Image (cartoon, rainbow, N blue to C red):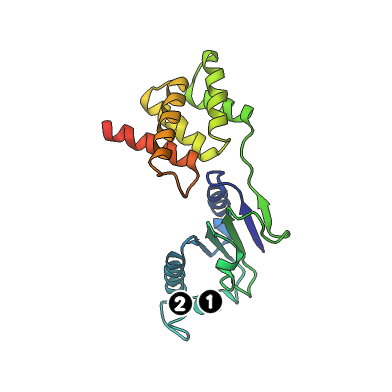
Amino acid sequence: GVVALCGLGGAGKTSVAVEYAHRHLAECGVVWQLPAEEPAALAAGLSELAGQLDGRGGPNADDPKARVHAALAGRDDWLLIFDNAPDPADIDGLLPPAGGGRVLITSQYPHWPGDQELDVPVLDQGTAARFLLTRTGAGSAEEAASAELAGELGGLPLALDQAAAYMRATGRTIPDYLRAFRDWRAELMARGELAGYDKRVTTTWVLAFAELTRS
């Protein structure tokens, strides 16, 4: 079967796919994660998988897709993850047409076929705020700041986890982090450096890298 895990950048789609793979390792003879965002990386991933499956020999030696499909056609113990696919057209024809294996697709594209699409939601603000308080060990005095930061981070689990990890590592309070996050985001936006990946996740990364630079 094919399932497309859809959601915002930082919602945890890849984490869900990897966790699923770990839980089913015992029943899968082949588990492979393919980077699907860029055609060149996807082609390289298919070539590597083809080599693992058939030793780079046999027919269709110059066609990794055909080699992968041929190797998987007669078995049902495989799981392929196409990670961060832009839309269905970008992986059209790459999914094995035969065999009884499973395919997981992660994507920010919201309009996959209805029988494939599974939304990965973000956390509501209250749940996200409680997560920050619990992970950082903050007290009730930081509840208001926690709610504000949860809103700024949009309930994205990846951004929330990175922020909490930063605060645990540095000893910063939630109000301190909230101020730093807003300052860094404004600076990055002014410099035009927030294109691409989700802006909230990017800002949490930049804050962590800045801390490493100061260390």
- From the viewer's side, name the closer residue of 208 and 32: 208
Question: Which residue, given by chain and number where applicable, does mark 1 sit on?
Answer: 71
Q: Is residue 2 above or below residue 11?
A: below
Query: Vertical placement of 137 versus 200: above or below?
Result: above
SS of the residue at dot 2?
helix
Q: Position of residue 213 (x, y in %)?
A: 27, 35
Task: Give me the C-alpha separation between circle 1 and circle 2.
Answer: 7 Å
- Residue in the picture at 56% in, 18% down: 144
Evaluate if marks 1 and 2 touch, with contact meaning CB atoms under 8 Å apart. yes
The answer to whether residue 215 shows anywhere in this view is no
Residue at left offset 56%, top offset 57%: 26
Name the residue type under label 2. Answer: Asp
- Inspect the image, locate mark 1, and give the three-letter code of the amino acid beneath it: Ala
In the image, what residue occupies the spot 44% across and 44% down? 194
Rendered image: mark on residue 179? none
Q: Secondary structure at mark 1?
A: helix
Furthest residue to the top?
A: 141
69 sits left or right of 98 in the view: left
Q: Residue furthest right?
A: 115
